[in-house]
Image (tube, rainbow, N blue to C red):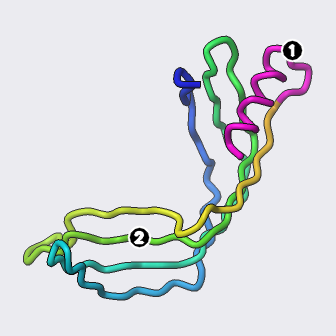
Amino acid sequence: LDSMGFVKFDLGSKPAELSDMELTRRFIKSSEEKVLQLDGLVTYDGETDIIIDAVVVRVPITRIGFSGRFSVLLRPLVGEKPIIAGAQIFFLDVPDIDYEFSVEGAGTALQAMVSIVKTTLR
């Protein structure tokens, strides 16, 4: 699976839903750094145009949905515009993910690869 990659990755035009947002200012002692931390819930469910190149076959994903608690760390904070020099975005816990593959009329190689991709994503 080291040679798998994305040929196309388009989540479409539907925006993700954000809720329960909380912004806090933190101080990281080890680096003596001030950061802004934005936590919240994100939910997305929409049609996609994603194609995974799995060497011998391309696997199309037609829908993806996910939800979970995420965090955005805005750091380092600098004394001049743009004030925030970078951002780290991550899920605080493993998100719930659901997806659909387009395998109608697909050959045995594609169906086998879909099985491998599903197992890998779990």
Q: Which mark is residue 91?
A: none
The magenta segment? 103-122
The answer to which image quadrant residue 18 occupies is bottom right
- Estimate how packed mark 2 is, as few (under 14), some (14 to 19) or many (20 or more) residues with alpha carbons within 10 Å: some
Q: Which mark is residue 108?
A: 1
Instruction: Give whichever of discs 2 and 1 has the lower sequence position.
Output: 2
The answer to which image quadrant residue 101 occupies is top right
Q: Secondary structure at mark 2?
A: strand
Residue 106: say if magenta: yes
How many numbered marks, from 0 up? 2
The answer to which image quadrant residue 89 occupies is bottom left
In the image, residue 46 lies at what x, y percent?
Answer: 72, 54
Disc 2 residue type? Val
**Which residue occupies 26% across, 78% down?**
35
Marks 2 and 1 sit apart, C-alpha to C-alpha, by 42 Å
Q: Secondary structure at mark 1?
A: helix
**Which residue occupies 63% across, 28% down?**
52
**Which residue occupies 66% across, 37% down?**
49
Q: Which mark is residue 72?
A: 2
Q: Main secondary structure of the magenta part?
A: helix
Residue 102: say if magenta: no
**Relative vertical location of residue 96 with respect to residue 74 in this rendering, above or below:** above
Q: Relative to 45, is 6 on the left or the right? A: left
Q: Relative to 29, is 21 on the left or the right? A: right
